[in-house]
Amino acid sequence: MSKKIKLYHYTRAEIQSIEQKGILIRTIEQTRRDFMEQYKSKLSSQAIEHFTSSWGHECEDFNIDAQHSVWFVSKRPEENCMGVFYLVSMYGGEVISMIGEGNEDSKRFLESIGEPLEVVCSIPEDDPSLVRYGNTECRLQRAVMPSEIIEINKLSCNPAKSEWKY
């Protein structure tokens, strides 16, 4: 049996979805389509216009490997680490939240949905899909199964103060 390592994933998401489905990998297009299908009726017309026009004008410089991976750290960061703050303060991962940050209506909406979460996973150390970078950062080039999730911890997050806590 392969030795397991504990990895930490930070996100703002719906806890029930992660409990039921694990951490999924979707394309940019799938993520955005699903977001609009689920939330379009709750967005202001200005926010819808901001998202759709921004998506239509962005450059295609997303790293393909990065898109098809779940990112982790192997060591729990200190509270208020800004790298984690960005991940837990707005819903949708980078393909949604990076665009939302440029518009106050969009940003407020993304800060209001989902919950800031720490997802602790147990992954085989020799998993061929695990890529390590020599620091604490690593990525898994596959989805995380619900059975690989050890715990899901709710975090507190105050976007107005750029703070988050365990």
Image (cartoon, rainbow, N blue to C red):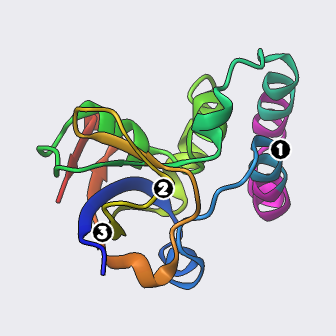
Q: Where is residue 48 in the image (x, y as percent from the top left)?
A: 82, 39
Q: Which of 67 and 126 is in front in this view?
A: 126
| Residue identifier under label 1 | 29
Question: In this image, 34 relative to 72: left or right?
Answer: right
Circle number at residue 46: none
Q: Is residue 106 visible?
A: no
For residue 85, above or below residue 17: above
Q: Position of residue 157 (x, y in %)?
A: 29, 51
> Which quadrant holds the C terminus?
bottom left
Q: Which of 131 and 159 is in front in this view?
A: 131
Q: Position of residue 94 (x, y in %)?
A: 57, 37
Kindly report the distance in space between the C-alpha atoms of the residues bearing marks 1 and 3: 28 Å
Kindly report the distance in space between the C-alpha atoms of the residues bearing marks 2 and 1: 26 Å
User: Is tag 3's residue or tag 2's residue first in the polypeptide sequence?
Assistant: 2
Residue at point 30%, 81% (across, down)? 1
Q: Which residue lies furthest to the front in this view?
A: 1
| Residue identifier under label 3 | 154
Within-10-Å neighbours for mark 3: few <14, some 14–19, many 20+? some
Which range is magenta? 34-50
| Residue identifier under label 2 | 128
Residue type highlighted by circle 1: Glu
Q: Position of residue 148 (x, y in %)?
A: 41, 77
Residue at point 64%, 46% (across, down)? 68
User: Is tag 1's residue or tag 3's residue first in the polypeptide sequence?
Assistant: 1
Whether residue 45 is in magenta: the answer is yes
